[in-house]
């Protein structure tokens, strides 16, 4: 698992504005992708450790929106909004993520799902509008650790689905 501010093939034009987090999940790509596309799954694992999610509305399609609240372990509520900008099942999801529709500080994320034997390698590449917004996300909101924990929650969730399926 890695988290950096740069692409692995050398600095890109957005290197100082991006966060890249990868993780190998011990589950088939189709299941990992599905966990991102259905609200019944997302609400079970989305967010860093100790957070829960309440969905206000969800429509998974290009131009569709996910309006939700993340509840922090300290009781703080975080209003969140995502719109899907590109969908290529089961390989890629691109989205715009902010606190609300039209948020001038919203950031773009691209998630890719690559087969890795019987597992799936997921990469989450997030690009912020400015280096300052990226640095604020890292320092104030612990975006790198939060991203790692979120993908860890995803891995635990889908691994449990696979395990339960094997028991049936």
Image: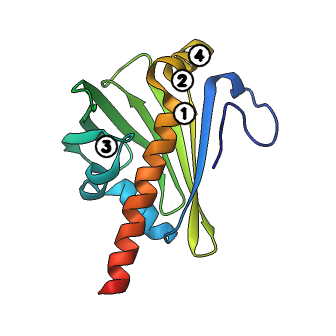
Q: Marks 4/3: CA distance?
A: 25 Å
Q: Is the residue marked by circle 1 packed among few (<14), some (14-19), or many (20+) residues within 10 Å?
A: some
Quote the CA–CA distance across marks 1 and 2.
Answer: 6 Å
Q: Is residue 15 above or below residue 42?
A: above
Disc 3 + disc 1, Cβ < 8 Å: no
Determine crowd level at label 2: few under 14, some 14-19, many 20+ residues with C-alpha closer than 10 A: some
Q: Decide if residue 108 is on the left or right side of residue 101.
A: right
Which marked residue is nearer to the observer: mark 3 or mark 1?
Answer: 1
Residue to which mark 2 is pinned: 138
- The mark closer to the camera, 2 or 3, is 2
Q: Tell me which numbered mark, 4 or 2, is placed earlier along the sequence.
A: 4
Task: Please state the horizontal and vertical placement of residue 156, each as a whole percent of the image.
Answer: 41, 60
User: Which residue carries the number 1 mark?
Assistant: 144
How far apart marks 1 and 4 lie (CA) works out to 16 Å
The mark nearer the N terminus, 2 or 3, is: 3
Q: CA distance from mark 3 to mark 1?
A: 26 Å
The numbered mark, 1 or 2, whose residue comes first in the sequence reads: 2
Using the image, determine if residue 137 lies above or below residue 83: above
Residue 130 got which mark?
4
Element marked by disc 2: helix
Residues under numbered marks 1 and 2 in contact, where contact means CB atoms less than 8 Å apart? yes
Residue found farthest to the top? 132
């Amino acid at each position: 698992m890695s988290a950096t501010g740069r692409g692995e093939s050398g600095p890109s034009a957005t290197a100082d504005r991006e966060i890249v987090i990868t993780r190998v999940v011990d589950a088939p790509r189709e299941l990992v992708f599905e966990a991102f596309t259905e609200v019944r799954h997302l609400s079970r694992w989305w967010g860093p450790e100790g957070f829960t999610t309440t969905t206000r509305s969800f429509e998974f399609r290009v131009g569709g929106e996910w309006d939700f609240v993340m509840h922090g372990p300290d009781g703080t509520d975080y209003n969140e909004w995502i719109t899907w900008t590109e969908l290529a099942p089961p390989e890629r999801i691109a989205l715009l993520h902010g606190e609300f529709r039209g948020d001038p500080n919203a950031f773009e994320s691209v998630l890719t799902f690559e087969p890795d034997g019987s597992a799936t390698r997921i990469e989450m590449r997030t690009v912020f509008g400015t280096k300052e917004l990226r640095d604020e996300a890292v320092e104030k909101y612990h975006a790198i650790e939060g991203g790692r924990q979120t993908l860890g929650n995803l891995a635990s969730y889908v691994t449990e689905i696979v395990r339960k399926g094997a028991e049936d």
